[in-house]
Amino acid sequence: MTSKIDQVDDYIGKCNAPVVPLLKDLRAYIHATLPGASEDMQYGVPVFLNAHGAPVLYLFGSKEYVNFGFLRSSELSDPNGVLEGSGKPSKHIRVLPGRPVDWAGLTAFVTQCESISSDARNTMH
């Protein structure tokens, strides 16, 4: 049986070469920043659950960028309108290889994901 970690590794390994290092960095960042985070493959992408078991983050690697996504974005405070996407409740921040990552900006959202409970699970749209 393939473990969830192996499945996420396979996903990252199959992505376009320019985004692979970025996906690896963002994955490590999630585990370092979101206490008790676990990962799974859902919807065909790596999904990260918080300590309450709520799926809160995802990574999507395209050919030219990575979407750092928030599955429950409707529950996050975004006073500056940083989150992109038309999906409800799922929005993202686009991260580009070779460009600086706004780690502080990501952290502002990721820390909000800590308190989201697992009782009202949403799906990506």
Image (spheres, grey):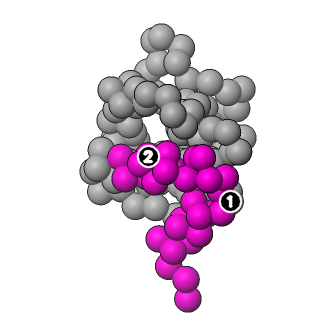
**Residue appearing at x 55%, y 53% in the figure:** 20
Give the residue displayed 43% in from the left and 21% down from the top. Answer: 77
Give the class, few, some or many, for how many residues have Cα within 10 Å of label 2's Cα (few <14, many ≥20).
Answer: some
Q: Earlier in the sequence, mark 2 or mark 1?
A: 2
- Magenta residues span 1-29
Residue 9 relative to residue 108: left or right: right
Please give left or right for residue 7 compared with residue 110 in the image.
right
- The picture places residue 86, in percent across and down from the top left corner, at 71, 26
Residue 8, image x, y percentages? 54, 65
Q: Which residue is mark 2?
A: 26
Tell me the tag on residue 44. Answer: 1
Residue 110, label in figure: none
Residue 67 picture quarter: top right
Q: What is the chief secondary structure element of the magenta stretch? A: helix
Quadrant of res 103: top left
Q: Quadrant of the C terminus?
A: top right
